[in-house]
Image (tube, coloured by chain):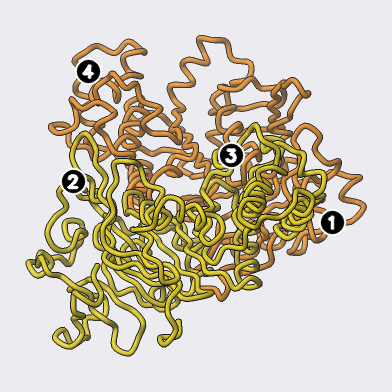
Amino acid sequence: MAGSGTAHLRSGDAVLRVEDLSVEFKTSAGTVQAVSSISFDVLPGETLGIVGESGCGKSTTGRAVLRLEEIAGGTVAFRGEDITTADRKTLRALRRRMQMIFQDPVGSLNPRRKVRDLVTEGLAISGAPKSERADSAVSVMNSVGLDPDFFADRLPRALSGGQAQRVAIGRALAMRPELMVCDEAVSALDVSVQAQVINLIEDIKQEFDLTVIFIAHDLGVVRTVSDRVMVLYLGKVCEFGEPEAVYASPAHPYTRALLDSVPQGEVEGGFSGPALKGDVPSPLSPPSGCRFRGRCPRAESRCAEEEPQMRQVETGQYVACHFPLTPVSA
Amino acid sequence: MNSTEKPLLEIENLRTYIGTPRGTVRAVDDVSMSLGHGEAIGVVGESGSGKSVLARSVMGLMTPTAARSGRITFEGRDLLSVTNKELRSIWGKQIALVFQDPSRSLNPVVKVERQLTEGMRHHLGISKSEARTRAIRLLDEVGVPDPERRLSNYPLQMSGGMRQRVMIAVALSCEPDLLIADEPTTALDVTIQRQILDLLENLRRSRGMSMILISHDLGIVAGRTDRVAVMYAGQVMEQGKTTEVFAEPQHRYTEALLASTPSIHLPRHTRLRVIEGGLPDTHKPPVGCRFAARCGFADESCHDPDLGFFQVPGRDHIHACTHPTSAVRNAADDQLKESTSGR
């Protein structure tokens, strides 16, 4: 589906609590709701994996968490503080505690600055004295596995993709954030390097007590890093739950189709299930009701009339579907 | 492949060296492989492995500073010595190429109809109206809905998946014997990627076409090819029946690559296997095994300059590892002669 609802939100002290978040983009052809009434929360020390295909709103969601996109509706509360209404000064202070890692590691670094200055850019902006920055640069470079003696004076163009991503992670770490948003942070890397960066993110998460939002299109990557997984489709949430449950017994037909589309060498024919038909509809005029219904093998007339709400299914995860693949719990 | 039948394509000791301001890059360095009629071979490797340059070398589509040596025989013809005129009659008609990015390989200011019919009219000498009829049939075959209307579309009016279908239709239009697909689905979402892979598979079977499928994604190649070659730093590390190579990788590089790929079946927070370090300098590659510097099993024997291939007994499966995962082998007997296998 792709629906709304907040049944999957947990009680307790979430680092981040997002309710009914909507983000709109105005285009010459009309307004696109890139993110439409999405809710989720992330508990301390948890990694939330957000997965979906192009146009599902996963990156927009990540950016909206730092208010890097204008928020059209809903609330984003970081440690209980609503960032959607925060003034500039508060927002700046809050953003220091939330850091973001982007997909293109080399492109997100200033080509004219040395690694030692890049990793402390945030500290410099926040007015930290030079001596503190120098110490921090060395310790941060060590944390991300870059030998300071070798890398401190290098420029981004002399770095490989994996090394540049380490610098980007180091730069975020230098701010001692509580929440780190990784937007396709390993997608541009070769598998062997990708594994290095994934392991690094896991290490620093422990070492620095981080909470992580990990946005990726690669279902394998999301499975390995996440404590909770959220599947998005065309700006709506389909499913939310623990990775074991979501991957082993997906409740949403879209999640099932996504998993069946992952090439698997050990399976005869390469895939474990049938292919999904059709293409993602235009976000300018999304289908009524469930946005996935046009491609869904289980869709019925109700799916066009009524938007599904998040409900818990017996396997413990939450799904926004009128006809889920696992029964709804009583 | 039937051993009595002549292969469709035979690559022997191919070297493609590219001149750059910083010296010569040995992009493809002594690669041999052969492809039978109707067979699909996968070429996998990370960036810098030489897999794309290999594809372009077969087509003769390298940068001007590149030089090829060795031998590429296609249907009995030596592709390294054909004239440009002959090459033009091979391109599209006998060997066709599908690239990664359909938005860059289709001309953005030309309608789909002309991009589809141009090659057919040139190679097959058919009339405009017949080419149009064939174009509609082709679009239908590759799963483009409403093909007649799509003919008057410009590429930008279509989604990425549709554009890749059009690209495949263009590649198939003159009924090539060999389709080279270079990362054909890398720019696409998984559900669309799945559709395109299914399409390529069905078309290959129905037309009896051979295919070289190049990808960085082991999973894609695993399910869709008969044989596979694993490349690293310009060389083939391991080659054999796809099912066997993935089930029982022999080379330590293949093994490490498989272990570092996150799968949808791994438990939460699994520590991924890491391959430390980076690619060797392709200007001056190390002597012996090029993976040795990153390999936990490497010793002096890996720096032997005459490292050849070993064959897995009784199987169509060769590898260039002196410390294979199944260390049980008879080195003296298995060492293939350099002259027959190359690498």
How many C-alpha atoms fall within 10 Å of the one at disc 3: few (<14), some, or many (≥20)?
some
Pointer 3 chain:
B
Shade of chain B as shown in the rendered figure: yellow
Mark drawn on residue B103: 3
Which x, y percent locates residue A112? 28, 18
How many C-alpha atoms fall within 10 Å of the one at disc 4: few (<14), some, or many (≥20)?
few
Pointer 1 chain:
A
Distance of mark 1 from mark 4, alpha carbons?
59 Å
Which x, y percent locates residue B194? 62, 59
| B250 displayed left or right of A252 | left
Give A104 or A79, whichever is nearer the viewer. A104
Distance of mark 3 from mark 1, alpha carbons?
33 Å
Residue type at numbered disc 1 = Ala
Residue type at numbered disc 2 = His
Q: Which residue is mark 1?
A: A299
Mark drawn on residue B283: 2
Of badges 3 and 4, nearer the viewer stands 3
Task: Check if mark 3 and mark 1 are on a common chain.
Answer: no
Residue type at numbered disc 4 = Glu
Shade of chain A as shown in the rendered figure: orange
Q: Which residue is mark 4?
A: A132
Q: Residue at the location (51% across, 60% down)?
A: B95
Pointer 4 chain:
A
Residue B95 to residue A304: above or below: below
| B324 displayed left or right of B223 | left
Pointer 2 chain:
B
SS of the residue under disc 2: loop
Residue type at numbered disc 3 = Ser
Q: Residue at the location (45% across, 71% down)?
A: B75
